[in-house]
Amino acid sequence: MLVSRLLEYVGLEPGRFEMRWISASEGGKVAETVREMTERIRKLGPNRKMRDER
Amino acid sequence: MKQAVEELRRQAAGLLKEERVKCVIGWTQGTDVARAVPFFATSVRQAARLTWTPFCVNNLSKYLLNHRYDNTPLAVVVKGCDSRGINRLVQDRQFVRERVVVLGLPCGGMLDREKVLRVVDPGAALQEVEDRGSEYMLRTDKGEYGFEKREALLSKCLECEHNIPVVSDLMIGPQVPSPAGSGIDRFAGVRELETRDPAVRSTFWDRHFARCLRCYACRNVCPACNCKECSFEQAVPGWQQGACWLSKRNHPGQNYLFHLIRMFHVAGRCIDCGECARVCPVNIPLRELYRKVMKDAEELFAMKTPGTDPEEVPLLSTYRTDDPEEFS
Amino acid sequence: MPRTGVFVCWCGSNIGGVIDCPETAAAASGFPGVAFSTDYKYMCSEPGQNMVIQAIREHRLDRAVVASCSPRLHEETFRKTLVRAGLNPYMLEMANIREHCTWVHGADIQQARIKAVDLVRRAVAKANRLEPLFESEISVTRRCLVIGGGVAGIQAALDVADAGHEVILVEREPTIGGNMVKLDKTFPTLDCSACISTPKMVAAATHPNIKLYTYAEIEKLAGYVGNFEVTIRQKARYVDHEKCTGCGTCWEKCPTRVPSEFDAGIGQRTAIYIPFPQAVPNKPVIDREHCRYFATGKCEICAKLCPTGAVDYGQEDLVLTEKVGAVVAATGFGLFDWSRVYGEYGYGQYPDVVTGMQFERLVNAAGPTGGKLLRPSDGATPRTVVFIKCVGSRDEAKGRRYCSRICCMYTAKHALQVLEKVPGASVFVFYMDVRTAGKGYEEFYQRAVNNGTVYVRGRVSKIYQDGERLVVRGVDTLLGRPVEVDADMVVLATAVEPGSGAAETARILGINTDQDGFFQEAHPKLRPVETHTRGVFLAGACQAPKDIPDTVAQASGAAAKVAGLLSSKWLSTNPMIATVNEALCTGCFLCVPVCSYRALEPKKITERLPGHPPREREVAGVNTGLCQGCGACNVACRAGAIEVRGFTNEQLLAEVDALCQ
């Protein structure tokens, strides 16, 4: 909770960071969460913060 | 404050004379009228140079770390906010409480040096300071100056939580009223930033972090930063650093990570002495960064300002089953 | 420069049927550090393993990546292969291209091919940074602690003892036997519960390898697998069991009567008592709370009458310690207290609304009614009996969400018992579902139905007293209409829940509980009797609701695990554990509270640095027996002084970098 609030505070878009509690037996939930997250991130576009330009 | 200064010198001299301590860490008058600098009194004679003015901003608890592995008995002078640093070091097991004599000073607030120098000639010699409750009277060889506390104090002092040290062996000088403004929201700065548009906030921090010099002054002054070797300077590539992860190169993205990682290293441990923001050569509002976590932790987990209670366990090292959570 | 070998396995058509394994192997040959790469139909087979060994020798490989199935399946296999080839077993990295790739991406072959190559690249990046790890050995105390003297604990204790190891069996009640010995008959065979459990109790008490502590609780468990030290509190019995002969004079003459816990509150016992006549040990304890002497300072009838002078009011709790190498938690279950929440069933106000356990005591030949089915309110024989199932089970609003597993069967048993004891009786069972998975269970349920039990699918909405009768109102959801039964007695099948004190026991043992409060097994399918704390095993209903056959089976399973552990004097430790860089450790010990295994402890070191006199300071030390390599400390250490061997920062970052290419 602290992390998500902080990341939003320093300018990350809300929704770019998420924590979920998923047990090893909840395969469906993992897939669902990853799908949701991927969709959301795709809409937000690439992250511009903290980029490592090597 | 004259009475407190005299008592401080007398007590320090006593401690040194009886050889109860080898060194009293305090302040002495600095190079101009509005500056006090850390001072290490090791003899009775030097004890007479100790001072206590509204310019004694430095948090001296950090200096205890210089002696963490020897057995030198020390005394250190602390204000209310600095005293939380003593608890920090003791909790982090960097210092045994019994080894240090803590001289506590009830504090009426620290004056903003810049504001004072706008009025007073830097070359003036400070003769006496009088704390009149709502204002400070500065007597110098070039005249007397009055400063309304509401106007001229550092913002951290107007948000003061403990003007009386939370830990001390000896309280020096008379009790003084807290300089905290009535009805002041301690986290007003954080809240103000929170209400802004994410994009504005993003630019705000981008601009600040881009200016960071990576001088590490914020780290060097911080009593919560008490690692033996900072993770940003380890030679071996590590999680926090190294050729493959975070370089020392001054680059906006890297600077971002530096500040966020440092932020998490002090999360739940930062005592809010405000020294990081004071020493920052490019004026990054670091206090508003660290206090974000402090505010959230207070609201979510009822965390007190770290360092308030010597028995507390740092927030991120503990949990209660009834902690709120947002997991789904 | 590392010389890494990459071995891509087809796993028959599991992998080879989706991606082109030779192509993957060819792609891998171009990765940094890869000196050799190949593919094969079944890498885990004998020829496959020989191929790996031969390649290692021929190409002077010093580490290997096997791209195949989950490491859960074959990591151990290939580690042994490496040993056979003369390498350190930990110079192996697996890339899971089956479960993580071909099984889930079979529909998109193109993407699967790319992902397989990515996964192999990640594994190679890590493999290039692997370092040999070495197991160390710790000694094993070849004794076992069993906590709980119910059927699970007794069975586990007997099996371990028969395997030749000493067992410390600790039971908190004055007798062993647990819940099973309270039952009258057991489904589906209807054999007498006491007849099959009391001989086991005696066997446990008299076994030369079993040391029995009754009326005792564990207070602390220190140490680690192979080397635990348990602190046991022997509660004061106020009766010297050395002198007592169990003659029974005291409990016959004791003037105080209180509800008997053993009889689920429907019978009575005295203040100095044995829970039931066949108790083991068959010697009494004084219930201090209810004893007249302790309350008023007067009475002492038992002390005066005792022929051997065994009563000792001055006895105190005894705290003792035992050293053991393994622990079996068999603390059993409790029953849901329905009267707190089920207002529609009268909040426990109606004496003839009883629980299944009370019913057991009512029909038990050794129970308060001598086995005659008489209802508690007036001692009349009930002619119409209603059973309500799932009271507290499968009821998220008022009770527990899970199914208690045993109620369907014992309710069928109770129904049969009513029909047998009261000829011509009417028996109604209100149910949600009837679950009879078990050997002979469905047949048993059919027998209850065929003998005249009326099963009504639906819940009871209200019970109220009307004169001598209880009116049970419910709904038959199959017929879709309300039902009302005038009953003489109602029996509630209350939910099985974690035993009282389960959370405290879990804390003492350092094991986890699941969301319902039962002890958490290490893996629901593959490690059902182990816990995440090495050396602590589970048996019986403390892990989840279970019937007797399952409980006994699990107890024997746990015993087999214990016997395996204790079979050797030495135990090799997992080398993939936390390690502290003492130069960096500041000794803040913030890692200590985050360690679930209590594996971190302060350690004094003498530091010699150029330009400084040698100085002593405290740093964190890892107990190699306790550490499980979970990495929690690694994260908590802001100084970056802790790393987990086999998962170092350098290795993990290399993996991330390889994946992000």
Image: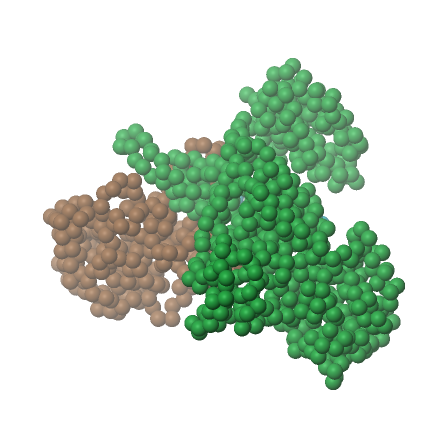
> Residue at the left extreme?
B45
Between C542 and B193, the residue placed more toward the observer is C542
- The shade of chain C is green
Residue at the limit of the structure toward the top, as seen here:
C58
The hue used for chain B is: brown
Q: Is residue B220 above or below residue C62?
A: below
Answer left or right for B24 relative to B66.
left
* Spot occupied by residue C381 in the image (x, y as percentages of width and height): 77, 75
Residue B176 visible to the viewer? yes
**Residue under the point 43% across and 42% down:** C601
Q: In front here: C154 or B178?
A: C154
The answer to whether C98 is drawn above or below residue B49 in the figure is: above
Viewer-proximal residue, C153 or C311? C311
Is residue C570 rendered to the left or right of residue C462? left
On the image, the x and y values in percent for residue C241 come to 51, 55
The location of residue B157, given as percent across then percent down, is 32, 61
Q: How many numbered marks have been drawn onto this rendered protein structure?
A: 0
Would you place residue C427 above or below residue C621 in this image?
below
> Which residue: 51% across, 47% down?
C596
Residue closer to the observer: C207 or C41: C207
Q: Which residue is the extreme one toward the front?
A: C307
